[in-house]
Amino acid sequence: MPLIIKESKGVFLLEGIINSTTLKKFKEHLEFLLTYTKSVTINIEKVSAIDKNGLKVIHELFQVAKASKKSFAVIGYGCKAIYETMDITTTS
């Protein structure tokens, strides 16, 4: 299943899977958003699976946001597990 990224009221809704087949599009799109916005919030409610490479990219995006003094947040069912896995909090 492809990864679909839609924006609604400033939140980017992800639908599908985040794995090696969708990772490039996911990373490039979110890096672009972090470059040109003050904050990025992604909702993973409709993401059916995230592999370890997807988790690694999410962690890298947190680091990019922190270095750029921007806000990056993950919301939706399953986000608590992502935060616990990486031992990180939202940046601001």
Image (cartoon, rainbow, N blue to C red):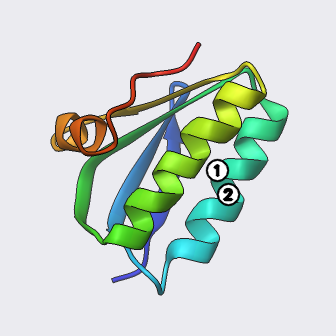
Q: Residue at x 46, y 83 (%)?
A: 20
Q: Quadrant of the N terminus?
A: bottom left
In which image quadrant can residue 65 be found? top right
Image location (x, y in percent) of residue 80: 19, 34
Image location (x, y in percent) of residue 66: 66, 26
Q: Secondary structure at mark 2?
A: helix
Q: Quadrant of the C terminus?
A: top right
Q: Give the answer, above or below, for where 33 lies relative to 25.
A: above
Q: Residue at x 83, y 34 (%)?
A: 36
Name which residue type carries label 2: His
Nearest the eye: 68 or 42: 68
Task: Give the side of residue 39 with respect to residue 87, left or right.
Answer: right
Q: Residue at x 39, y 30 (%)?
A: 88
Image location (x, y in percent) of residue 47: 27, 59
Q: Give the answer, above or below, for where 67 lies relative to 20.
A: above
In which image quadrant can residue 52 be found? bottom left
Q: Label 1: which residue?
A: 30
Q: Residue furthest front?
A: 87
Q: Residue at x 39, y 77 (%)?
A: 19
| Tag 1 near tag 2, CB within 8 Å | yes
Q: Give the answer, above or below, for where 74 lies relative to 54.
A: above
Q: Residue furthest top?
A: 92
Name which residue type carries label 1: Leu
Numbered-mark total: 2
Q: Secondary structure at mark 1?
A: helix
* Cα distance between the residues tagged 1 and 2: 4 Å
Image location (x, y in percent) of residue 75: 32, 32
Q: Label 2: which residue?
A: 29
Callout 1 crowding tier (Cα within 10 Å): few <14, some 14–19, many ≥20: many
The circle drawn on residue 69 is: none
Callout 2 crowding tier (Cα within 10 Å): few <14, some 14–19, many ≥20: few
Task: Give the side of residue 29 with respect to residue 9, left or right.
Answer: right
